[in-house]
């Protein structure tokens, strides 16, 4: 949740909109201020997302699986993305061994 504090100079009019909403007519200065606040908020969110991504990378495989299974309705998208990233790394590492096993006929081409 984010709070937006508007000064009287930031808007011309406020009126009730359908279904409980608010219609706010911004001044030019208010629109600029809103864009500036949104840019700062986006930057703060990016930092938090980067910190969460680093935290997810720091988890062991067991911890990541436990986190993925703990969420009702399925794992969050960033947890799935980290699991997929790890699977790609694993697949890249075992490609040479799979090639050898295919070459000697232990496993067949998929």
Image (cartoon, rainbow, N blue to C red):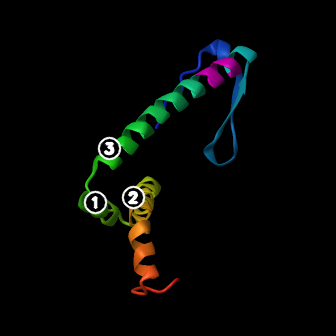
Q: Is residue 49 above or below residue 10?
A: below
**Quadrant in which residue 4 is drawn:** top right
What distance separates the C-alpha of mark 2 from that of mark 3? 14 Å
- Name the front one of labels 2 and 3: 2
Q: Which of 47 and 61 is in front in this view?
A: 61
CA neighbours of label 2 inside 10 A, class few (<14), some (14 to 19), many (20+): some
CA neighbours of label 1 inside 10 A, class few (<14), some (14 to 19), many (20+): few
Residue stretch in magenta: 31-36
What distance separates the C-alpha of mark 1 from that of mark 2? 9 Å
What residue is at 34 percent from the left and 49 percent from the top?
56
Q: Is residue 95 above or below residue 9?
A: below
Q: Nearer the viewer, residue 100 or 107?
A: 100
User: Considering the numbered disc 1 on the image, is that residue within a helix, a strand or a loop?
Assistant: helix
What residue is at 41 percent from the left and 36 percent from the top?
48
**Quadrant in which residue 29 is drawn:** top right
Tell me residue 73's x, y (percent). Answer: 41, 67
Q: Are the two marked residues, 1 and 3, in contact with CB atoms closer than 8 angstroms?
A: no
What is the magenta segment's predominant secondary structure? helix
Q: Is residue 99 magenta?
A: no
Q: Name the residue under label 3.
A: 55
User: Considering the numbered disc 2 on the image, is that residue within a helix, a strand or a loop?
Assistant: helix
**Quadrant in which residue 37 is drawn:** top right
What distance separates the C-alpha of mark 1 from that of mark 3? 13 Å
Q: Name the residue under label 1.
A: 61
Tell me residue 101's x, y (percent). Answer: 40, 79
Tell me residue 65's x, y (percent). Answer: 30, 63
CA neighbours of label 3 inside 10 A, class few (<14), some (14 to 19), many (20+): few
Q: Name the residue under label 2.
A: 86
Counting residues from the start of the chain, the first of labels 1 and 3 encountered is: 3
Q: Are the two marked residues, 1 and 2, in contact with CB atoms closer than 8 angstroms?
A: yes
Counting residues from the start of the chain, the first of labels 1 and 2 encountered is: 1
User: Considering the numbered disc 3 on the image, is that residue within a helix, a strand or a loop?
Assistant: helix
């Amino acid at each position: 949740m984010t709070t937006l504090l508007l000064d009287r100079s930031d808007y011309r009019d406020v009126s009730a909109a359908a279904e409980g909403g608010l219609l706010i007519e911004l001044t030019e200065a208010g629109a600029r201020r809103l864009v500036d606040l949104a840019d700062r908020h986006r930057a703060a969110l990016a930092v938090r997302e980067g910190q969460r991504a680093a935290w997810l990378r720091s988890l062991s495989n067991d911890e990541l699986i436990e986190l993925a299974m703990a969420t009702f309705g399925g794992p969050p998208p960033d947890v799935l993305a980290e699991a997929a990233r790890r699977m790609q790394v694993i697949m890249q590492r075992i490609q040479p061994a799979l090639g050898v096993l295919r070459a000697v006929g232990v496993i067949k081409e998929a």
